[in-house]
Structures are given as C-alpha cells and as structure tokens.
Image (cartoon, rainbow, N blue to C red):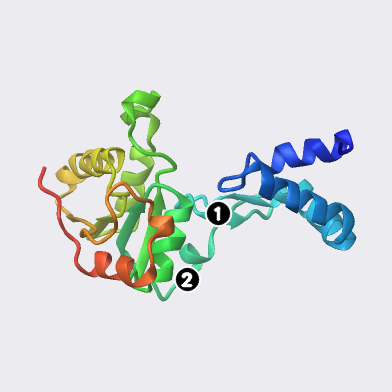
Amino acid sequence: MLPERLNKVIHLLARLPGVGEKTAQRFALFLATEAGDVANHLGAELTTLLDHIRPCDRCGNLADYDGTAAICDVCRDTRRDSNLLCIVARVQDLLAVERSGAMRGRYFVLGKLLSPLDGIGPEELPLERMINRIREDKVTEVIVATPPSVDGEATALLVARELEPTGIAISRIASGVPHGGDLEFADQITLGRAIDGRKAIDG
C-alpha cells in the first residue's frame, strides 16, 4: 500500500537498534509527509557522516576526523587524570559512564567483548594497542567497566590477565548494575555507585 521507495526506508529504519517495524513506519511517514526540511537535512548529514566521524586514534571513542587524525574531546581534555584509564566495550558504555559523573580519567574502547560462541577470541580484541596506550600515558590505575554479563566478565578477566605483568592497579566496577544488563541503560546514580565501589579483580 506504500510506495516502494518508502518501504525501503522503513526496512532500513527497522534495522536500527530498538526500532521495530511500526516505529520505523511512523518515522518514515513523518519524514515523507510532515518534515521535508528535516528529511533533507538528515539525508545530507547521513551521506557525509562516515567521512567526518571516525574512531578516536587514541581511545576508540567517536571523534571528528579532519582528514589526517581523529582525536575525541575526552582525549583532548587536559583537565582529566591521564593516570586513570577506564576500559569499556562500546562507545555507548563510555557515554553511560560519563553521565554518571564518577569518572575523572580517560577511556579505552575495546569495540567488542570476548565471545567464543560468536567467534570473538582474544586475538580479536585490541589488547596490544590498549597496553601501548597504558605505557604511553603512564597509567597507574585501570578500571574495567565491561557489562556484568558472561562475556563481560570473561573480557574483564582477560584484560586483568594481560595487564598483570605491568604491576598497575586493576579494578572492576562494583555490582549495582543489573546482571546481564547493558551499561547503556543503567541510571546515573546506580552507575556512579558502581564506579565508586569498584573492587580489585582476582586473577
């Protein structure tokens, strides 16, 4: 009952996280019937998005790309404690920790979690780049803020094992975040308490 081009937009929108078929249809109809300017601006921004946004060269957070380098705002902030590094799985987790207001240091984004069932082993994680970052910044404490899931716990143990020879302090965010949940959906108070109540990882 809808034009084929509009159906294509609906199917693409439905592939976004948290967007079902009905929500995608509502978005597409709004863009096509009530928001011409929004549709045009959105289309223009999406067309060039990947040309101007890249993972930060230092931490993996998203950053503006100027054609030669991409350094995020967190890494540029000289007021942050460069000796304290928080390791997260995804950019969404980094943003969640930032909202808590409990993190005064910098970050390193792994990009994925250890998951043998999905074919993601230790060699798929940027562990060498993580260790180099820690050495370059003379990091003295690492907070592992991976989700409290099976894959998140396995990744935390792997990171702790890799960093053990460095002798730096390694801690894990405390419980308080629901087991099996994503940091992205944790409220600010719960996540802030989890950061404040972090504890050492037993290898």
Q: Is residue 51 left or right of residue 147?
A: right
Question: Residue 30, percent across and down?
Answer: 81, 56
Q: Nearer the viewer, residue 199 or 129?
A: 199
Left or right: residue 134 versus residue 50 is left
**Residue at point 32%, 49% (across, down):** 147
Image mark for residue 77: 2
SS at badge 1:
strand
Determine whether label 2 and label 1 are within 8 Å by CB.
no
Amino acid on which disc 2 is placed: Asp
Rendered position, 131 above or below 81: above
Res. 16 image quadrant: top right
Q: Quadrant of residue 103?
A: bottom left
Q: Position of residue 117 (x, y in %)?
A: 34, 24
Displayed quadrant of residue 34: bottom right
In the rendered view of the protein, which quadrant contains the N terminus?
Answer: top right
- Circle 1 packing at 10 Å, graded few (<14), some (14-19), many (20+), is some
Q: Is residue 161 above or below residue 32?
A: above
* Residue at image coords 35%, 50%: 181
Question: x and y percent of residue 105 in the render?
Answer: 35, 67
Task: State the residue at coordinates (44%, 52%).
Answer: 59
- Horizontal side, residue 65 vs residue 118: left or right: right
